Structure formats: structure tokens, C-alpha cells
Amino acid sequence: MTGQDLSRELLGRRFQNPLLLAAGTAGFGRELAGVIDLDRLGGLVTKAVSLAARQGNPPPRVAEFPGGMLNSVGLANPGVEQVRTEALPWLAAHLRRAHVLVNVVGFTVEEYGEVVARLDGSPAITAFELNLSCPNSSAGGIEFGAEAGCVQRIVSACRARTSLPLVAKLSPVLPDIGTMAVVARDAGADAVSVVNTVPGLLFGTNGQVRLGQGFGGLSGPALLPVGLLAVARVAERTSGMPVIGVGGVRSAADVRQYLRAGASLVALGTGALADPRLPERIVAELEVLDG
């Protein structure tokens, strides 16, 4: 057995390995202190950060099924000021090797830029991940990422507020995810993250919906082939632009599939919720080559 060098250079930094924790599943890092060694990972993506604090959707917020789970957390978070003054300083003090990407959400184009501006210059941040699957409140709730003009305006607005790398996170339900990735790149994005969850609905044995909000986002094993196809299409269209693959990862073999499809980094989400020690095991397996 010999050790394998998994490091890679992108977003202006050296990542010691390709494994990230996906947004929404690692909190702000502190929640996993004492459970896993975050510095064994390539990095983590924080929970979504909005301009104002959000309580999120009514419970129940999670419903499991054989192919994974639905979640309807509703972007609950403490708001940008608390993240700036508490969460990011903690990450800066406790991480030495793992990189931090901050997931940013907004309900108007201006909110995205404002969140980025307020966090710009804070310790620990390697890049901003722009969640373009949020509902556009001024357009009747349609997702920002569903319309090229919205993607262009959000990325451009954020690009004007920071010199840090921007990662555009796109929905898997876009009719042409490759074209939308090009739009994001041309507007100033440095990388693309694919995919976010797929909308879904589940009923219980009593005939009632299983989530308090009604519908939610599907994640888990069923999302793996969706994510792989999205990565392949984006990588093909963007000619070398870094792609972060997300969705359905449960093993080192799944990570290798994403890398084979063209991903530079791979984010683990639902699998780590079910088994918090899974990320470290995956890294250990990736580091070992069969002799």
C-alpha cells in the first residue's frame, strides 16, 4: 500500500484532498467539533447565510425513504451578522488545513450582494457559494437559477462586492445546466457547484404529507446519477472551469465517479448526516492505493 497525493490547486488555494462537506449538512463546523477532524477534509461549505436570521420551515423537516431523504429546513440560519461575528472567527481559530466556502442565499438580487459585502474580508473564507436555487420573491417564487438574466445579475452583483472566488450552485432541474454554467462563468463565477436537491413529495400511511412545508428537496443515493450527468455536462461546456460535484456520495468509489466525470472537488451531504464519521473514512480510503 502506498499513499496517494490527493491535493489539487483551484480557487487560488491548495486543497489537500477533494472531499468537502456540503452546505446545510455541516452547520458552521462547530456542530461537528469532537465528532470528526474537520482538518482531515479538503474543506466544508457552511449552512446558507441570509441577510436576516431565518427560523426556517415548520416541522417535520426531514422524511426518509429508501432512496434517500426529503428535507425542508427552509434555509434556517442566524443571519449574516452573527455568522460574521461568531461562526467565521470560530472556523478561523480551529481550522488549519481545511478550506471554508460560505453558502450565500438571498430573496432579491440585492440581498446576495449585500451578504457577500458584509462577509467580505472576514477570516476563514476561501470562497462564496451562491445558492441560485432560492425563490425569487419579486418573480412569484421562481428560482433565481432558472433564468439566465437572474444568474447573470446575481453573479455580477456579487463579483462587484468581493475579490474572493465565487461558486455558482445550480439546480439539477434546469433544462440546460451547461448553458447556465456558461452564463455564470461569463458573469464572473470562478467555479460551478452541481447539483442542489431535486424537488419531491412524500405521503405517510395516514395519507398526509410527511413534511410540514409539504414538499422538500430530495438528496441521498438517488441523486448520484443526476449529479454525475450534471458535472459531465458542465465540465464539457465550460472548458476547464472547476466543477464541484454534489449529490448521492456514500463512498470513495462515488467520489472517484465524480472525479471521472470532471469534478475538481466532491461534496458529501446526506451520507455524513447518516454517518458523521463517513467523511474521514472516505478520505482515508482515497489516500490509499492498492499495491
Image (cartoon, rainbow, N blue to C red):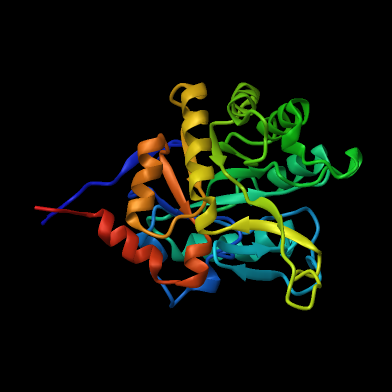
| Residue 28 % position (x, y) | 58, 64
Image quadrant where residue 96 sits: bottom left
236 left or right of 147 in image: left
Image quadrant where residue 73 sits: bottom right
Frontmost residue, 70 versus 288: 70
210 left or right of 3 in image: right
Count up the numbered dots.
Answer: 0
Residue found at x 59% / y 51%: 102
Residue found at x 47% / y 29%: 235
| Residue 62 % position (x, y) | 67, 70
**Is 100 located above or below residue 193 in the figure?**
below
| Residue 269 % position (x, y) | 52, 59
Frontmost residue, 18 versus 89: 18
Q: From where the camera sits, is residue 284 visible?
A: yes
**Is 164 located above or below residue 24 in the figure?**
above
Residue found at x 55% / y 41%: 193
Residue found at x 74% / y 34%: 146
Frontmost residue, 240 versus 230: 230
Q: From where the camera sits, is residue 15 visible?
A: no
**Is 234 located above or below residue 53 in the figure?**
above
| Residue 134 % position (x, y) | 75, 47
Q: Which image quarter is the N terminus in?
A: bottom left
